[in-house]
Image (cartoon, grey):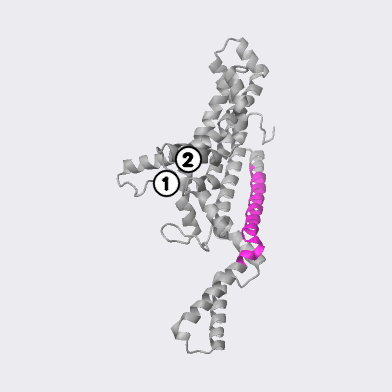
Amino acid sequence: MIPKGFLKFVGKRTILLLISLVAAIYISILLANLGGIIDEMVKADLIMSITMNVKNNPAYQGLTASERQKIIDSLYQSALEAKGLNTPFLVRSLYYLKDALTLDLGTALYLTSDSGSKQVRLIILERLPQTVMLFTTVTIINFFTNLLGGLIIARKYGSKIDKAIAALAPTSTIPGWVYGIFLLLVFYTWLHVLPAGGLVDYPPPKDPILYSLSVLRHMILPMLSWTLAGLFLGIYSNRTFFLIFSTEDYVEVAKAKGLPPRRVDMGYVMRPTLPSIVTGLSFAIIGSWSGAIITETVFDWPGLGKLLSMALSYPDPPVIVGEVAIYAWLLTITVLTLDIVYAFLDPRVKVWGG
């Protein structure tokens, strides 16, 4: 039977996280619409479009200027009502909030999917697989590379390789897209061995195997740029993390007993750090689903990062809010799940009575 204390803990955490979720999405709605300025821009586009259509329509050529203006005003009011723009922005923002919380993302103002749909849900779902394929893959590779690298370097504290990693750690302050530009200069501009960007060669190969190989070739440079950006700092951070735990008394006792180094690392150093490792991996994966705006733009990768860049440049508030809402929900669910996992994974965490 599940203890009441545990259910109370989960209930409180759920309420607090939902409050944070609502606040985050509502703030994003206000920012994406610039407090209603975007709506005024949409209204201006509407009146201009309707005016031009009426003036250029042969059916209205015989009407007087005042009669045409009445038709324009009527069509404009109908368009405002259809788009819900005939109510104050603060009222509409609450409707936007309800729709975002229920993931009813509506239609985009300007952007469309490759199939021509303006449904925000379809636009995002169309780009999500590309982002997951690239950034989730490289995030998982980087995470375990840094984790194992840090564990190995921690064993060799003070060695030449340890000092080299520490010296190279500041290079990770350079953003991944900067490495990307450098890699493009080397492998595309000078050596001509890898493509400059995009998802696949043009025209796309019809054979599935050749198509997959083409996609892999296009993934090499963006993956390499992200790996280089976080490699040395990631290894150094994990090395320092494991060094802290390796000085605990129970680790020294295990070493004194003559246990093999591998068993000491896995059973006495890694095990107490599992909550932190699980947290790091979970947030890294969720974070990777949002893509990288500049990196995807540099490599012309058709993912969520580039989509967000396009939505910001137009601007297209429904797409911006849609991406934020999906990410916020994923983050909220992840945090709540981790809180529940910690209760069982870490014996130091007590969420029920006793």
Relative vertical location of residue 230 with respect to residue 72 in this rendering, above or below: above
**On residue 199, which mark appears?**
1
Q: Position of residue 185 (x, y in %)?
A: 48, 39
Residue extending farthest front: 190
Residue at image position (60%, 61%) is 96
Residue at numbered disc 2? 184
In this view of the protein, which residue sits in the foreground, 239 or 281? 239
* Amino acid of disc 1: Leu
Which span of residues is magenta-colored?
10-39
* Amino acid of disc 2: Leu
Relative vertical location of residue 44 with respect to residue 276 in this rendering, above or below: below
**Quadrant containing the C terminus in the rendered view:** top right
Residue at image position (69%, 35%) is 353
* Helix, strand or loop for the magenta stretch, by majority: helix
**On residue 248, which mark appears?**
none
In this view of the protein, which residue sits in the foreground, 348 or 216? 216
Q: Where is residue 59 in the image (x, y as percent from the top left)?
A: 44, 85
Q: Position of residue 101 (x, y in %)?
A: 58, 56
